[in-house]
Amino acid sequence: KKLRIAVIPGDGIGQEVMPEGVACMKAACKRFNIDIEFDESFNDWATCDRYLKEGSMLPDNWKSVLSQYDAIYFGAVGDPEKVPDHISLWGSLIQFRREFDQYISLRPCRLLPGIECPLANKKIGDIDFWVVRENTEGEYSSVGGKMFPGTDREFVIQDTIMTRTGVDRVLKYAFELAQSRPKKHLTSATKSNGISISMPYWDERVKAMAEGYGDVKVDKFHIDILCAFFVLRPEMFDVVVGSNLFGDILSDLGPACTGSIGVAPSGNINPTGLFPSLFEPVHGSAPDIAGKGIANPIGMIWAGQMMLEHFGCKDAADKVMQAIEEALGKGGPEVITRDLGGKGDCKGLGKHILELIETL
Ligand code: NAI
Ligand code: MG
């Protein structure tokens, strides 16, 4: 079956890094005979310019249009000089996540060559794990409220909601990811010593799910010591799964520990395939460097690599990763962009990686 990808570059450097991402994906798919189509007709979707012209970030029928695609390849959104961030973000990316029930947020934490690791004495291969975050419920519910505001009886309540369906589906995804990897090791983030109702429930569901995955080694840590272990002993992780809040924290901390937060990608995934999943770089639209042609395209390209992996196109995904690592490790200052200490530009680095995808 032909894969169809909706390409939405969005604002700022999204417009600059996306062409490099699409070109690299096309090269990888051509080399490995993957039948895929990149629809680049969404250029003004999720842009603040569109909002100023049309009064909305997306056309009214966006959901039915995008539902027909297998994935969304997304750049970045936001131009705070023109439109407040909460309007641009809630009018686009957050709509996609919610309406397409992208209940998994997935981020790689991998040491790459040529990027200085903030942790001492780590070599390539030492850090290579995934953070899987629950993306729809948990601590980020809007149930609660403020009572007696402005008085000394004032108080606030915000409830955590964990449904069996919601917890089990993220755990299932994480267990299957662990099962697909050589180490077959899953770590669960908890805090059942302090949070005495919801977190013991999370632990209970982990235990129940583990019974169906006898070959996966399972452990759990409280979120505080788990954060410490990310920094002190990152070698010990393979797949780490957490609730919405814990996963949020871990999915920034993990890439930060490898120094790669600036080039990191992210997947917002609906594993059922009923709706498209979305792949994007972690970074935003970078208004401070937009239009200068100096943005690093690696986050965009790596996000495309995740998309290929998501579709099971392993050879193509591995080749893109190999090309990224080769460019970072051996590309040299002429090719590497300024954010990583080189003198290269967006187009040059993108072209370099594309050629590596074709020839490595
Ligand atoms: P940002 O990630 O856009 O920029 C932070 C810093 O990193 C800036 O100095 C920028 O120049 C640099 N940077 C980011 N990506 C880079 C790249 N590829 N190459 C070289 N340097 C890069 O975050 P910021 O400044 O907080 O937000 C700017 C806008 O982006 C806001 O409107 C915000 O709402 C939006 N945003 C959108 C996201 C998304 O679309 N998923 C995520 C984060 C922010
Ligand atoms: Mg975060």
Image (cartoon, rainbow, N blue to C red):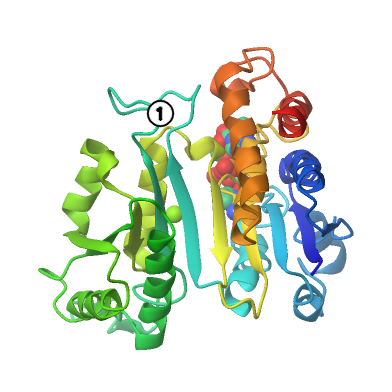
Q: Is residue 229 left or right of residue 3?
A: left
User: Can residue 286 be seen?
Assistant: no
Query: Where residue 35 appears, x then y in whole percent?
Result: 82, 59
Q: Is residue 264 left or right of residue 5?
A: left
Residue 312 sits in quarter: bottom right
Task: Pick the residue in front: 151 or 166.
Answer: 166
Q: Is residue 303 left or right of residue 134?
A: right
Q: Residue at x 53, y 42 (%)?
A: 264
Task: Pick the residue in front: 317 or 198.
Answer: 317
Q: Is residue 351 above or below residue 199?
A: above
Query: Where residue 116 appears, x then y in whole percent?
Result: 43, 23
Mark 1 crowdedness (10 Å alpha carbons): few <14, some 14-19, many ≥20:
few
Q: Residue at x 28, y 40 (%)?
A: 235
Q: Quadrant of the C terminus?
A: top right
Residue highlighted by disc 1: 124
Q: Quadrant of the N terminus?
A: bottom right
Task: Pick the residue in front: 190 or 218.
Answer: 218
User: Can residue 58 be seen?
Assistant: yes
Q: Residue at x 28, y 24 (%)?
A: 120
Q: In the structure shown, which secondary structural element does the residue marked by tag 1 occupy?
A: loop
Query: Where residue 290 appears, x then y in whole percent?
Result: 72, 36
